[in-house]
Image: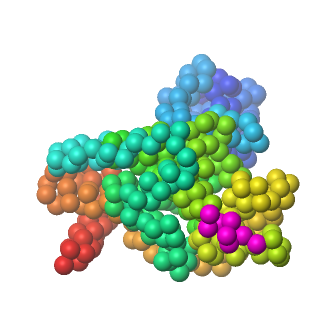
Amino acid sequence: MVTRIAVQPEILRWAVERSGLSYRDFREPVREWIQGESQPTVRKLEDFARKAMVPFGYLFLKTPPVEPIVIPDFRTFRDEKLRTLSPNLRDSITDIERRQAWMRDYLIDMGSEPLAFVGSLKATVSQQRAAALIRKRLGLADNWQSQHSSWENALLGLRRSIEEVGVFVCMTNQVGLNTRRALDQNEFRGFVLIDDYAPWIFVNTNDTKSAQMFTLAHEMVHIWVGKPGLFNLEKLEASEDNVEQFCNRVAAEFLLPEERFRASWTKRGSLLSRCEQLASEFKVSPLVVGRRALELKLITRPAFFKFYEEQMEHWRDLKEFRRAAKKSIPVFWQQQDQRLGDRFGYAVAQAYAERKLLPSEARDLTGFSRDAFSKYAEGKLRQQLGATE
């Protein structure tokens, strides 16, 4: 006789909403279960739990569990705070927390000193002073973007500069190696976890390269302020939190210094042409340029938000075109360097080579299979050896 299980309708609704899927995405008759027309078998319920990415045991609770958000959540949508985390976002945060905990212990064992700049910046200083201090620590000139030929190169250059001072940077568009678990750019653009030995930046790359630049700069400022956070920067605006506002202003000044920006801004031509011209100069997106112009009162709010909607529509069309054409697909190992970050990848490879890390631990930290990790570690060590010769 087949055993069937009665599940609280509220739990089933919660599981579907938490997954971010619709009822039609499930092969199981979830609506029938909720309405009491039928009950699931153990196997059907297990299949549902896997699809919904919810722990199987949760389905036997009487009321939905409270899943606390472990870092300050500054995300908003249409001026309302977002309250939930998808399984993909929650698992991404958990992965980074695990890597950060290991990396902190590893650095302490290696005799590393805490990073003095973490939490060194007060939100009371001027944005010009704050941006100058960060540039100085990174060894960057006021016009550092001019050294790069494209947005992509400038983004890579900034990431390397940030990693060189001790910050870890992860940039990916999926959970681990699972291409079916894509990260939603509308849910979040990035998050930052603070630690005085291993501060960590996470950038969701399901966004334009030039928009990723602003996310990276924003999160970088959070580390100097010493405040963790999760954000989506809807319409490139920070939440009403004072620290968030400060980080946004400093990020804008870091990428588009006011003095240079005003000198380059022209009132001639369309808003698009003006923004594209400065986007090329500062290696950011036209949207970031438009947002800076609004901040400096060079354009009106209605003009900016009309421009914003037009640009987002263009970006969505372009994204669909590129997906259909299958262009610009990075090779697998380049993707892994982005996903894990150079510093973390090398540290894991080095610890594994020195037998300070078990094979199972290395695979757990990186998400690789045994053979894939061996190839990755070998490549990272060879890469590091070549850099020191």
> Is residue 116 in sight in this rendering?
yes
Find out whether residue 263 is within the magenta segment.
yes
- Nearest to the observer: residue 254 or residue 260: 260
Quarter occupied by residue 245:
top right
Q: Position of residue 135 (x, y in %)?
A: 44, 60
Which image quadrant: the N terminus? top right
In this view, 337 is above or below 291: below
Q: Does residue 338 appear to the left or right of 149 in the view shown?
A: left
Q: Position of residue 91 (x, y in %)?
A: 48, 44
Q: Is residue 57 left or right of residue 208?
A: left
Q: Is residue 336 visible?
A: no
**Tally of numbered tags:** 0
Residue at the outermost left position? 354
**Magenta stretch: residue 321 in it?**
no
**x and y percentages locating residue 86 in the rendered image:** 59, 42
Q: Is residue 274 left or right of residue 194?
A: right
Residue drawn 77% across the image and 60% down it: 298
What secondary structure is the stretch in magenta mostly built from? helix
Question: Whole-percent x and y of residue 280?
Answer: 63, 76
Quadrant (top left/top right/bottom left/bottom right) for the C terminus:
bottom left
Farthest residue to the top: give it. Answer: 62
State whether residue 172 is above or below residue 192: below
Read off the magenta span: 259-266
Residue at the image position 55 percent from the left and 46 percent from the top: 126
Q: Is residue 122 above or below residue 8?
A: below
Query: For this view, does 96 lie left or right of residue 24?
Result: left
Residue positioned 49% across, 28% down in the render? 57
